[in-house]
Amino acid sequence: MTNILQQPYSIEQYAQFAGQANQNRQRIELQDGNAYALAEYEKLENGIIIDLRDDSNYKAAQLSKFKAAKLAENEQKRQVEFITISLGRMKTETPLGDLKTALPLYEKLAKASNGLPAGAVRLYDNNGNLVLSPELTYEQVEAVMLEISLAYIQIDQKSTQYCSAIENAQTLAELENIEITYGG
């Protein structure tokens, strides 16, 4: 496919040109009546298609764009790990809110009554099956909360390391080499 459709052209020719450009993931720009199919790394200047891949401003913009995407990937995976940790150990079944909010409240309730009654929280076994909590002593509640809190701290530390590596990446290749994995 040619990247330029010059006038005069019919509606059918333009539609075919646009369809081909779409298949090639190109955008169309019109200038002086001519249609140009441009790749993401190209710009149109006075009827000339210019390749920007070696342009320092383009490279900086691309790096910034991919850093933002990598940071978003990290945040999504971090949140999934938080949920996995939470659901893998304990989940509130009351209107106390999410687990991070509920942990201090459970601790206060357990401290005030020297534990929690049976069924106060939902626990999950290693296969993810629901097991209603037995009666828990204050020490047992503290142990569960400590386990979850330590896991949260480890996740946040790992996330901070990923964010730092992403922000310090100087090239797209460096950024692509950052593999974001949590768990295990």
Image: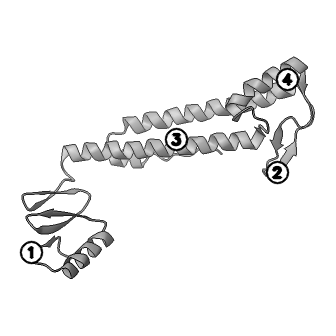
Q: Which residue is mark 2?
A: 129
Q: Nearer the viewer, mark 2 or mark 4?
A: 4
Q: Which residue is mark 1?
A: 7
Earlier residue among tags 1 and 4: 1
Above or below 159: residue 10: below
- Report whether 72 appears left or right of 96: left
Identify the amino acid type marked 4. Ala
Residue to which mark 3 is pinned: 75
Q: Residue at x 79, y 39 (%)?
A: 93
Q: Are marks 1 and 2 in contact (CB under 8 Å)?
A: no
The answer for how far apart the CA atoms under marks 1 and 2 are is 67 Å
Task: Report, in whole angstroms, how far the alpha carbon at label 3 lies from the one at label 4.
Answer: 32 Å
Q: Residue at x 86, y 23 (%)?
A: 139
Q: Earlier in the sequence, mark 2 or mark 4?
A: 4
Per the image, label 4 sits on a secondary structure element best described as: helix
Query: Looking at the rendering, which quadrant does residue 118 occupy?
Result: top right
Of the pair 183 and 131, the residue shown nearer to us:
131
Q: Secondary structure at mark 2?
A: loop
Image quarter hosting the C terminus:
top right
Residue 56 coordinates in the image, percent (x, y) = 20, 44
Label 3 packing within 10 angstroms: few (<14), some (14-19), many (20+): some
